[in-house]
Image (tube, coloured by chain):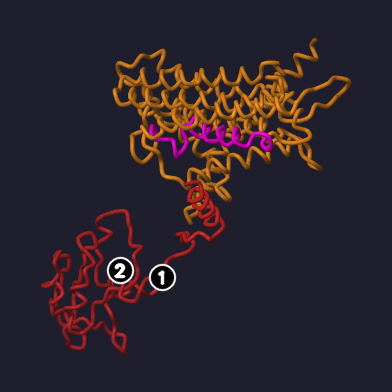
């Protein structure tokens, strides 16, 4: 009965000298896995133009109804989103919009640090989402 | 006469401030050691290695709202934490922390009061500390605090018994109750060699007396609200918190004094040896907290009365027999 107690003490003492596993945020940050669902990005094609054609499939499939799209005719007569808003406070980051999009125009990437101060600031419009990952 | 009073005042001041500093940083040490034993860092944000954490905690507690529960017995409510803090601090008056030296022709003993009944004084004072717990639970006007206080005081009283009996072996070997003489009698060999059973009983009783894990059912932070401390906030809570760590410090320094040769040690100055030994004991307390699950209350009481108490009596008997055989 005494030996197991001493073995327990030895274990804790041994653990005392091991390196802690804590990741010291914000100096060190965990690298997210490739399929992590963080902040959205509206992607661009090889010429740098927006891929989205405002087909509104993402808005239709969204369970939280947080995407608002308004199509319009672009300068080169192709369809493009005049308005593309995602309300980050309603969004549940499920990734259905990414799965539904036939062109791979909207994807969920690794940024999870989107905290802000007002509700208005957390409704990301088209330009914010287009330039979201260009720092 | 004036020099005597002055020296006594200076000693009191030094011991008091050293105690408060050690107790404050003991809270940090506990959190960091516990953290590392759980494969994580303790507090490390409030200054390098978290060294300003106790100051941050103190400031936080100072600025908290000081609530006095309605229908509480005001006088006892305010007085209870002071009782327990005073008994914890005053116990340090008879603990020798160094060799005596002469300065300007005056002999200065490194102990605040060289009473010739030092050990008896210590146990009497620590028994008074139980009043602080009981008063706190009663005055809170809360039946759960009261039950927690009653359980806690029953536990403390039961283990004080084996605590007192376990040091009688040391008393028999030295023939004196004075802590200074007990330390001086250990200049050849520490008493832990002569009294191994006594030391183990003392250690277990001390952990139970301080209501530390594995004997901390009455105040475990993750199960009960906080027992008798529930209704206390701000500075009164800070005093209870401080008193707990001061109690650990007193019990550790008593273990060092009675069993581990007090301030004896080669090369380094005596005070440094004393501090090192206390540090080892405090580390042991925290180490035990990190390792063991806690006792249920009935298991705790059974252990105190049916196991430790007879073992302590057995220790006294064996010591007496061996001493009479050897002389």
On what subunit does the disc labeled 2 rest? A
Nearest the viewer among B292 and A104 is B292
The answer to whether dots 1 and 2 both sit on one chain is yes
SS type, badge 1: loop
- Label 1 vs label 2: CA separation? 12 Å
Give the residue pinned by disc 1.
A31
Q: Vertical placement of A43 versus B26: above or below? A: below
Q: Could you tell me residue B2's position as x and y percent?
A: 79, 11
Which residue sits at x=13%, y=76%?
Answer: A56
Residue B230, quarter of picture: top left
Which residue sits at x=40%, y=30%?
Answer: B301
Instruction: Indicate the colour of chain B.
Output: orange
Which residue sits at x=57%, y=32%?
Answer: B202
Instruction: Indicate the colour of chain A.
Output: red
Q: Vertical placement of A77 versus B134: above or below? A: below
Residue A45 is labelled as none
Nearest the viewer among B314 and A122 is B314
Nearest the viewer among B138 and A3 is A3
Residue B43 visible? The answer is no
Give the residue pinned by disc 2.
A38
Residue B188, quarter of picture: top right
SS type, badge 2: loop
Magenta-highlighted residues:
B192-219
Q: Residues within 10 Å of mark 1 (few under 14, many from 20)?
A: few
* Majority secondary structure in the magenta region: helix
The stretch drawn in magenta includes residue B264 = no
The stretch drawn in magenta includes residue B217 = yes
């Amino acid at each position: 009965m005494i030996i197991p107690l001493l073995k327990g003490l030895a274990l804790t003492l041994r653990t005392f000298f091991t390196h802690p596993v804590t990741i010291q945020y914000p100096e060190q940050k965990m690298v997210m896995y490739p399929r992590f669902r963080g902040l959205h990005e509206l992607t661009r094609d090889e010429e740098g133009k927006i891929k989205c054609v405002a087909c509104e499939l993402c808005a239709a499939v969204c369970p939280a109804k947080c995407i608002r799209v308004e199509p319009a005719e672009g300068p080169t007569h192709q369809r493009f989103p005049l308005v593309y808003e995602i309300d980050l406070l309603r969004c549940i980051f499920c990734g259905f919009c990414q799965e539904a999009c036939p062109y791979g125009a909207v994807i969920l990437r690794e940024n999870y640090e989107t905290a802000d101060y007002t509700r208005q600031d957390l409704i990301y419009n088209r330009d914010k989402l287009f330039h979201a990952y260009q720092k | 006469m004036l020099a005597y009073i002055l020296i006594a005042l200076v000693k009191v001041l030094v011991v008091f401030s050293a105690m408060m500093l050690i107790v404050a940083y003991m809270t940090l040490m506990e959190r960091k050691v516990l953290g590392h034993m759980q494969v994580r860092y303790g507090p490390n944000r409030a200054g390098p290695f978290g060294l300003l954490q106790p100051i941050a905690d103190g400031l936080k507690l100072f600025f908290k709202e000081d609530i006095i529960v309605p229908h509480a017995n005001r006088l006892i409510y305010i007085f209870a934490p002071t009782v327990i803090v005073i008994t914890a601090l005053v116990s340090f008056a008879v603990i020798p922390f160094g060799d005596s030296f002469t300065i300007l022709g005056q002999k200065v003993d490194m102990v605040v009061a060289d009473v010739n009944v030092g050990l008896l004084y210590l146990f009497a004072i620590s028994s008074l500390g139980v009043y602080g717990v009981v008063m706190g639970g009663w005055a809170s006007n809360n039946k759960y605090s009261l039950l927690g206080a009653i359980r806690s005081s029953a536990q403390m009283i039961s283990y004080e018994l084996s605590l007192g009996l376990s040091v009688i072996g040391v008393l028999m070997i030295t023939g004196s109750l004075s802590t200074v003489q007990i330390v001086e009698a250990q200049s050849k060999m520490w008493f832990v060699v002569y009294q191994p059973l006594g030391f183990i009983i003392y250690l277990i009783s001390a952990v139970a007396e301080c209501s530390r894990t594995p004997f901390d059912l009455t105040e475990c932070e993750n199960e009960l609200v906080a027992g008798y401390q529930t209704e206390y906030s701000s500075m009164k809570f800070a005093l209870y918190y401080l008193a707990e760590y001061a109690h650990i410090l007193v019990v550790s320094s008593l273990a060092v004094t009675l069993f581990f040769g007090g301030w004896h040690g080669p090369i380094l100055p005596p005070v440094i040896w004393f501090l090192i030994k206390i540090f080892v004991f405090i580390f042991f307390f925290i180490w035990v907290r990190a390792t063991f699950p806690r006792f249920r209350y009935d298991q705790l009481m059974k252990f105190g009365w049916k196991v430790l108490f007879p073992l302590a009596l057995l220790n006294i008997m064996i010591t007496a027999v061996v001493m009479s055989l050897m002389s």
